[in-house]
Image: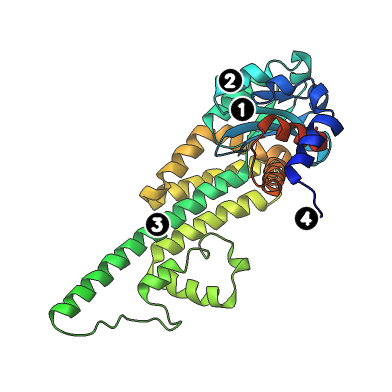
Amino acid sequence: MYGVDGDNLSRWYKHHISDYEEWEQRYHATQYVLFKQNLGEQLSMDETALSQGELYTIVTNKSAHGGKGSLVAMMHGTKSEDIIYYLSKLPRHKRLKVKEITIDLSPSMQLIAKRAFPNATIVSDRFHVQKLMNDAVSDLRVDYRWQAIDQENEEIAFAKEVGRKHIPDVFKNGDTRRQLLARSRHIVMKHFSKWTDSQKRRAEILFREYPAIEEAYQVSMELTEIFNTKCSKGEALTKLARWYDKVEKLNCKYFNSVIQTMQNNYATIANYFENRSTNASAESFNAKVKAFRNQFRGVSDIPFFIFRLTKIFA
């Protein structure tokens, strides 16, 4: 457009207008970039994909609220040994001042946080815990859906054998059993207060036909309420213990991973109730990186892409 070659303009900006050629971190930017001046008392750590699924671990400062000064470190890969090595390049006295770091449920992330920021309280992000529970409820729904598909296929085969047209049973909202279970995907993944009128009608039928899904959904929503209710850490722990007992009593195989995760991460999950910190800032930062990446239709020059990111967020 207007006779301007976009590739030439980009190269001109890179080599002549920007100070990329003088950027001191240029030679190791593909592996890591560090900004010791952005270390703060409260951090978040997460991972994001830059190009063709290449993962980078990102540490951000919550106090910067996603703006200038947010980026503390951006490191290639997720291997704990590598990330610990890169973060150890930050001044130790600054790392010791970090009071809290929020992470996902990954054991490697916990190891990184413990080694790199030994004085920090580690907080497992509540939304990752809730997602794990929501996924378990959805897996139960999918199991019933496959059963419904098998049943429908058997009915179709039988109808063919006896020379009849197969007409499936339909619920009062117009769904067949197979459709009911397929269309309930969003219902079991979100809070009932956000259901539309049609979703409320579908949920009523779903829970009547499948009480186990209703029971699992209610337990999932109880966990959300525990996280949403402002109370002391002691009160929250009591509620979590009662909730945990309820999940165990469901005796549902899809909740085994939830139970195991709670056992393995109980202390860091409980730490949420001290300051109610989440990884929302890290997720927001990742979304900005993704939008920036999409703006340039992918990342062909990773060091220069990271350089441009640092101009905005470091």
Q: What is the quadrant of the C terminus in the image?
A: top right
Query: Would you name the residue on which mark 2 appears?
Result: 82
Q: Is residue 36 left or right of residue 257?
A: right
Q: Residue at x 74, y 14 (%)?
A: 92
Query: Would you name the residue on which mark 4 appears?
Result: 1
Q: Looking at the image, tell me whether mark 4 or mark 2 is earlier in sequence order.
A: 4
Q: Is residue 70 visible?
A: no
- The answer to whether the residue labelled 2 contacts the one labelled 1, judged by CB atoms less than 8 Å apart, is yes
Mark 4 vs mark 2, CA separation in Å: 45 Å
Q: Secondary structure at mark 2?
A: helix
Residue 130 on image: x %, y %: 56, 49
Three-letter amino acid code at the position of disc 3:
Leu
Mark 2 vs mark 1, CA separation in Å: 9 Å
Query: Would you name the residue on which mark 3 appears?
Result: 140
Q: What is the quadrant of the N terminus in the image?
A: bottom right
Please name whichever residue, 40 or 268, is drawn nearer the observer in this view of the structure. Answer: 40
Where, by quadrant of the figure, is residue 28 drawn? top right
Using the image, determine if residue 67 lies above or below residue 172: above
Three-letter amino acid code at the position of disc 2:
Asp
Mark 3 vs mark 4, CA separation in Å: 53 Å
Depth check, mark 4 against mark 2: the one in front is 4
Using the image, determine if residue 20 lies above or below residue 183: above
Q: Looking at the image, tell me whether mark 1 or mark 3 is earlier in sequence order.
A: 1
Residue 22 on image: x %, y %: 82, 22
Query: Would you name the residue on which mark 1 appears?
Result: 76
Where, by quadrant of the figure, is residue 311 drawn? top right
Q: Secondary structure at mark 1?
A: strand
Depth check, mark 2 against mark 3: the one in front is 2
Q: Secondary structure at mark 3?
A: helix
Residue 252 on image: x %, y %: 37, 51
